[in-house]
Amino acid sequence: MATRPSWTGHLRFSLVTIAVQLYSGSKSTRNIPLHQLHKPTLKRVHNQPTVEGLGPIDKKDIVKGYEYKKGSHVVLTPEELDKIRLETNKTINITEFADAAEIDEIYYDKPYYIVPEDDIAREAYTIFQHALKKTGKVAVGEVILSGKEHLVAIKPYGKGMLMETLRYADEVKSAHSYFADLNNAAPDKDQLDLAISLIKKKSAKFDPSDFDDSYETALHELIERKLKKLPLEEKGSKKTTKIVNLMDALRKSLGDSEEEDTAPAAKSAKKATKKKAPAKAAAGKKAVAKKKAPAKQKRA
């Protein structure tokens, strides 16, 4: 495999243990790092830990502590923190199985591809993957990643399995306070029908490669132009549209989408008409000639 695993350990449920590896399912290579610089010298600004009254300190002298009252802390050593974590930080402990629909999407956090470590683990891995697929269940468990305990869900994904870290219940804000003022009154039928028509008109199969981060692209182009000492392009101001009436906006949106869909057909139809025009004219001349022929014969 091209990349190194971000974690190596065991997947354990009941008495079954499978040697597995985790590979991050996401990446942030699109992010262009911007450093903080000292403007007069353009030298890097470094964040160095300091203590009030002492100045800069060495990172090895930093310990963790909990502030139980203002200015007072209880110090916690790495050894003490390790003792209260899971019995091992190299095991994904499966505790239960749940229906996929039971886990709200808001709880899902970061994805990892989970693969068997070797040929010996492959058989048990395959059986577990097929069992999840057949039952429609998701394995729920816990694991320590980067020194922190995570709740995780494991599900079939393609020919393998995907492990996703989950947020704990107290990490998710309740939606009630945000949606409390919204009423459940039935919407206007005509407006709803127009909105549904617009959704159907604009529906397409989702392909993430069709989308791009326009800001990151523009930032990359800006950096390239400055490196090459090229003049910067001035972008025109964005046009703002005032939407006065929802029905008008929906009708206009539907009208625009219809124009987009019919534009190619209209253009091809015009081209076809232009090409056929001479043929029609020639046919018309022949028809006129045929009608006039008998008149000439009578005069003779």
Image (spheres, helix red, strand yellow):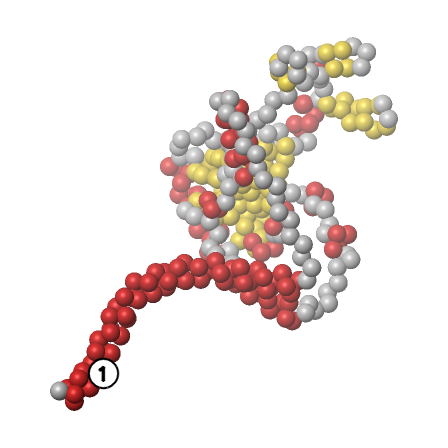
Q: In which quadrant will I find the C terminus?
A: bottom left
Give 33 or 290, whichever is nearer the viewer. 290
Around disc 1, counting alpha carbons within 10 Å, would you say few (fewer than 14), some (14 to 19), or many (20 or more)? few
Which residue is rendered at x = 67% and y = 18% of the image? Answer: 47
In this rendering, position of residue 164 left or right of residue 58? left
Q: Which residue is mark 1?
A: 291
In this rendering, position of residue 260 left or right of residue 166? left
* Residue 154 image point, x, y percent: 53, 45
* Residue 10 in sight: no
* Residue 50 image point, x, y percent: 74, 15
State whether residue 150 is above or below residue 279.
above
* Residue 123 in sight: yes
Which residue is rendered at x = 62% and y = 13% of the image? Answer: 43
Q: Quadrant of residue 243?
A: bottom right
Which residue is rendered at x = 53% and y = 53% of the image? Answer: 137
State whether residue 232 is above or below residue 183.
above
Query: Tag 1's secondary structure?
Result: helix
Residue type, numbered disc 1: Lys
Q: Quadrant of residue 247?
A: bottom right
Which residue is rendered at x = 20% and y = 86% of the image? Answer: 295
